[in-house]
Amino acid sequence: MSENAITRRSFLAGSAGAVALTAAAGYVGFNAWEQAHAEEAAQGGGETKTAHSLCNACSSKCGFTAYVVDGRLDKLIGDVSHPYAKGKLCARGYGYSQIAYSKDRLTDPLKKNDKGQFEVISWDQAFSEIADKVKAIIGSDGPEALAMVQDPRPSGKYYTKRFMHALGSANVYTHGAACNLSKESGFTQVIGTGNYSSDVANSKMTMFIGRSYADAIRPSSVASLQKAHEKGAHIVLVDPRCSNSRVFADEWVPINPGTDLALVLAMSYVLVTRGLYDEAYMRENTVGFDEWATSLAECTPEWAAGITGIDAGTIARLAVEFADAAPAASIEPSWRGAFGCSYANSGETARAICLFNTLLGCWNQKGGALFTSSVSAGKLTDERFADPKKPEAKIAGSAEYPLALSSMGTNLFAAQQAKEGAIKGMFFYNSNMAAGYSNTAYLAEALSNLDLCVVVDVQMSETAMLADYVLPDTSYLERLELPEFIGGKVPAVALRDRVLEKIHPNTKPVDEIFSGLAEACGVGEYFQFTVDELADAQLQTVGLSLNTLRQMGTASFPEKEFSYGNMPKWKTPTGKIQCTSEACEKAGLSPYPTWVAPAVMPMGNELRLIGGKQAIHSHTQTGNIEDLMQITKDYDLTRVWLNADMASRLGIADGDEVEVSNGEHTGRVRCKVTQRLNPTALYMPSHYGCSSPDQHTAYDVGLRQMDFVPFHLEPGYGAAMTQEAVVTVKKVGA
Ligand SMILES: Nc1nc2c(c(=O)[nH]1)N[C@H]1C(S)=C(S)[C@@H](COP(=O)(O)OP(=O)(O)OC[C@H]3O[C@@H](n4cnc5c(=O)[nH]c(N)nc54)[C@H](O)[C@@H]3O)O[C@H]1N2
Ligand SMILES: Nc1nc2c(c(=O)[nH]1)N[C@H]1C(S)=C(S)[C@@H](COP(=O)(O)OP(=O)(O)OC[C@H]3O[C@@H](n4cnc5c(=O)[nH]c(N)nc54)[C@H](O)[C@@H]3O)O[C@H]1N2
Ligand code: SF4
Ligand SMILES: [Mo]
């Protein structure tokens, strides 16, 4: 069978919803499984309760109804009304619910003793000792010497920011530097906002540049891609790796990794030089177009072919096909893979993509690229909810990396400051920085250098291992959180409600942890409310109440429904789409997006190390889920992928154990030899190589990409440049 043939087995391994069932129930359709399960529950005769909640296995936070029989979680059904779930969860969503019952859960507050071992302490001791250290740091170095890193979750993003602002520090970071910081910051330079959504289902042509809906899943996205495919849209995957999205695509363009910017500039060249764009539209809506258009003169398809490995004819054809399909066409905004944080040219790639879409005139057009709206909580009148004073200093890193959005910040700058001693205290909430944001050895050193490192987690992550204090959160199924507002064609709000009673009595939910810390640090006046009270107050401002949303799970705002055709208001400094950006120029970059080579290129037998998601895992947090890890083992999913021609040159056969090596790290793993990969790349799945022995299922399985990535930051943008790393690979024993 050919490499690209999609067997039923591989299809299931890549499709939403089906995989979690393989371990338990063989290959049955979801509806059949659901029905069988419902009958089972009915026969059991136990007391069934239901609650709506939101998945915590990735940033999508899909909504579901949880069924709890006699106090134990029985099943989850994706909520049809939730805009991302649309009635289905993905495999991770089902599998990750096991975290609640994991034998490796953190159950009590821990403190590291002089021998480097963790000891159980009381919450009172934890709060008061952490507070003493916080006060000492503020006393000696000011609140700017404190930082927080968090993965935005409904309550987490509110409480962590409020806590830090109450202490006087603006240093609140997300995981963005290792996810989508370059993309969102680059987009913002051009269109004044960090994202748009492609109207894939209604498009005539959509190009995905390093984005795979079928691997890096959000259920509603998979559904839209399937719909587009069925309606005959031209779907193009630009990816060094033939991803599982290929089942819904017409064309795989196996680009050399790190060179997407050249492709986009060359397609722009074709549209501009052949006049395949609306000149009046460009004049009316953009600034700096002439300057950018002139600069494109050198970006011919032939030039780009030499860089991208895609032949000039294909590049020109794709551009012309785009023009034919416009305005029902766009380059999809992507998320992380190609230009979220990967290369020295990621931010510039993001800018170029916005300009290409502008040439298509597709903004807010049916089938094009849309700016949908969102709703947020209104102003709260109760003074208990009044915000603390805005910190005086800006977020650390804003001068050095001025293009990084301050709403995400570059957490790597904070790590660098920790290593150099300028940042002395760091908090982590729902974040495993040490295993996933950049070079792991560097990050371990940086975090070890802190006077105070506090990690709030549910399991002993690599970051928690480096902490002075580890505070045990409840699992997401055991707590109510603040409402989550969701943008989209019809904006919505959804609730993560408590599904289960506390499993470990000495854990605390996030709101209580940060309220307790604040109290101990002397800023308790900003936390004189419960999460229920705040949730209800926020919902009242949009005409709902906590009780109503508890019943509904997800509520939508149809009166704010998106309508096609309205020209967006460009929230840029010039009020127009910016082909040129003053801020970029000030940051030392070109005023218009132009070719920037990757920081390193593979030479000789070297390969560029690229990563990518697998449908059954999320980042570093699901490796310890037994059923999900079992699927990894059943399908040998820790293998690195190597191009077949390259493999024969290197004397490596499919299934061989290989040694992957560079100046940062060396490790061994088995190899999958395939034609589904560009010959200049080595693909390493993103979810393995756990180095925390307390995660008994995940520990020491597979390799971890971040061990091989040097610690470095993208100029101007501050992202991790996670794919500016080359490695060599050889057969073990050869
Ligand atoms: N299963 C799963 N789904 C997830 C997540 C998860 O952890 N697991 N996480 C969620 C989150 S937070 C995110 S950010 C998204 C990420 O969503 P994506 O960005 O779609 O995910 P990735 O798998 O990192 O990258 C997508 C593709 O980019 C390709 N790629 C790598 N380098 C290059 C390059 O230089 N050029 C091009 N053109 N392509 C390249 C990879 O081969 C891969 O197929 O997924 C979300 N959904
Ligand atoms: N190795 C590796 N690195 C990566 C990625 C990858 O796939 N692999 N993906 C990249 C991307 S796209 C992103 S968005 C970032 C994501 O980076 P993070 O947001 O840091 O995601 P995870 O690495 O999954 O780590 C999440 C941590 O939160 C903990 N956690 C889970 N549930 C809870 C909870 O309810 N409460 C608390 N307090 N903690 C909880 C988990 O145990 C884990 O330690 O990582 C980036 N870096
Ligand atoms: S996409 Fe999957 S893992 Fe992510 S929130 Fe939705 S169900 Fe959970
Ligand atoms: Mo991400």
Image (spheres, grey):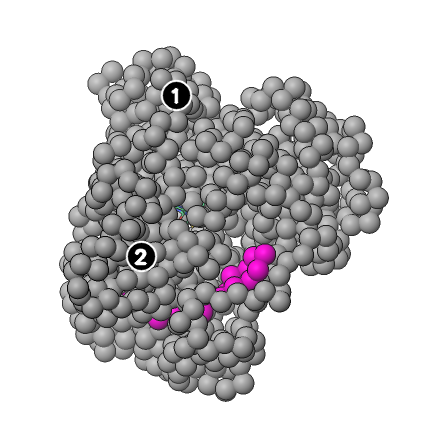
> Does dot 1 land on a helix, a strand or a loop?
loop
**Residue 24 painted magenta:** no
Contact, CB < 8 Å: mark 1 with mark 2? Answer: no
Q: Is residue 144 above or below residue 545?
A: above
Q: Tag 2: residue type?
A: Leu
Instruction: Give the CA separation, mark 1 to mark 2.
Output: 35 Å
Q: The C terminus lies in which quarter of the figure?
A: top left
Q: Going 77% across and 48% down the picture, which residue do you hit?
A: 286
Residue 347 coordinates in the image, percent (x, y): 58, 44
Residue 210 coordinates in the image, percent (x, y): 51, 36
Residue 18 shows up from this direction: yes
Query: Magenta stretch mostly in which secondary structure?
Result: loop
Labels in figure, total: 2
Q: Which mark is residue 654?
A: none
Q: Going 59% across and 53% down the picture, which residue do you hit?
A: 194
> Does dot 2 land on a helix, a strand or a loop?
strand
Observer-side mark, 1 or 2, equals: 2
Q: Which residue is mark 1?
A: 3
> Which span is picked out in magenta?
478-493
Displayed quadrant of residue 465: bottom left
Q: Which residue is mark 2?
A: 76
Image check: 357 left or right of 506?
Answer: right
Q: Going 16% across and 56% down the picture, which residue do you hit?
A: 103
Q: Tag 1: residue type?
A: Glu
Image check: 292 left or right of 499?
Answer: right
Q: Going 32% across and 39% down the picture, which residue do you hit?
A: 704
